[in-house]
Amino acid sequence: MRKFLHVFWIVFFICFQANAQELGIDSKGETVFNYYALKNYRVDIDSDEPLSLAFSWPRWRVRYFYTNDSRDTVTTMYKLRGVSTRISLLNSGETPVLTQVLKTPGLQLKLGYQSAIDTIYKLDRTGGTITLGFGVIGSFDNFNFYNSKTEKVSKEYPWTLGFEANYNYFYKEQQSNSKWHFRRIVSLRFAYKRTWNDDDLMQFQDIGPAIATPNIVAANEFKGRYGTLKNNVNQVRFTVSYPVFLWKLNAIPYLVMQSNITKNTKLRPGVMFNVMDEAVVYNNFNFPSMIGVGVDGIGDKFNVFIKGSFSLGKLSKNEPAVKSTAKDKKADY
């Protein structure tokens, strides 16, 4: 299984464009803000999804324009639309060591539609613009499981099925060549999943060589998950975030609302801070590589986490043909 996955990821890197960039996540590894750079290689790395890659095909460009007083058409922007596919390696057992993750890898597939900004010429003329997308989710997790009722250890592969939608609104920007360019966005995300009770399970370790005191137990190796596994959890999740960019700095305050339908709804506020390797500029909406740290929590319990998103450049300089046109204020997606 491990040899197959190694070969798969190498072939995937060579053949396709990685384009889905998760700029912000929460402490659960779930997305709070993402943007699809449909022409670039991208690699996303975090603890719950150690490696994520995506590609878009087919895709097409859409031209937006207005007619001036001289009856000439002036282009305001180009957008890309396409069918997107995202494949992620999952850290199903919440294993903190990468070598252990490769022993029990999970896999996630997302398939859907996405739109993205390709080139901006006059965002001050349009009064802002949006990107959006939607799709289906399928995944299987993979971990060692200690059943607290039967007291037996087994391998488990619980499935998750669902759908998600995302919406980003980019505020009107004044054209500027300043390196201190400012950008702000409102991002909304919704997801429904038929999944398993991940949050209810604890971690367990083999005792083996261990040290025990009245306060702690120190064991040698992380093993898997502990508790009672349920495969019929209906989970609804809604996220609102307000990403702001200035020069090479980015802050993403967010609020997550999550409900398992049969349980009380949980609200979890948080914020993530990123440092980018390039400053944001007026007419470029392909966000650069970045690394960041975030914090969120409920009550007096807070979680600190890190996230990296890296751009490896363009796969091809060829642009998709313009297959349709749209005037400003019409069909802006």
Image (cartoon, rainbow, N blue to C red):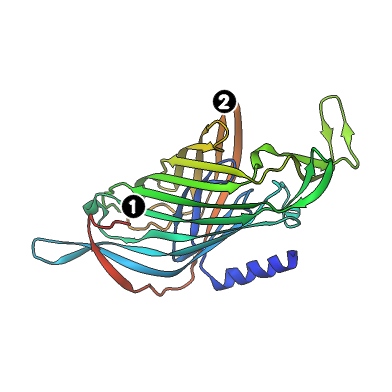
Which secondary structure, mark 2? loop
Query: Looking at the rendered structure, which numbered label has been put on residue 299?
Result: 2
Q: Quadrant of residue 115?
A: bottom left
Residue at the spot x=65%, y=42% of the render?
198
Look at the image and tell me whether residue 32 can be seen. Answer: no
Q: Position of residue 306 (x, y in %)?
A: 59, 44
Residue at the spot x=17%, y=66% of the render?
73
Question: In this figure, which residue is indicated by the disc labeled 1?
Answer: 130
Decide if residue 38 is on the left or right side of residue 200.
left
Look at the image and tell me whether residue 145 can be seen. Answer: yes
Q: Position of residue 220 (x, y in %)?
A: 84, 43
From the viewer's side, name the closer residue of 84 and 270.
84
Give the position of the N terminus as an image quadrant: bottom right
Q: Amino acid at mark 2?
A: Gly
Do the residues bearing badges 1 and 2 touch, measured as CB atoms within 8 Å?
no
Above or below, 38 against 206 in this view is below
Residue at the spot x=46%, y=46% of the render?
190
Q: Position of residue 312 (x, y in %)?
A: 52, 64
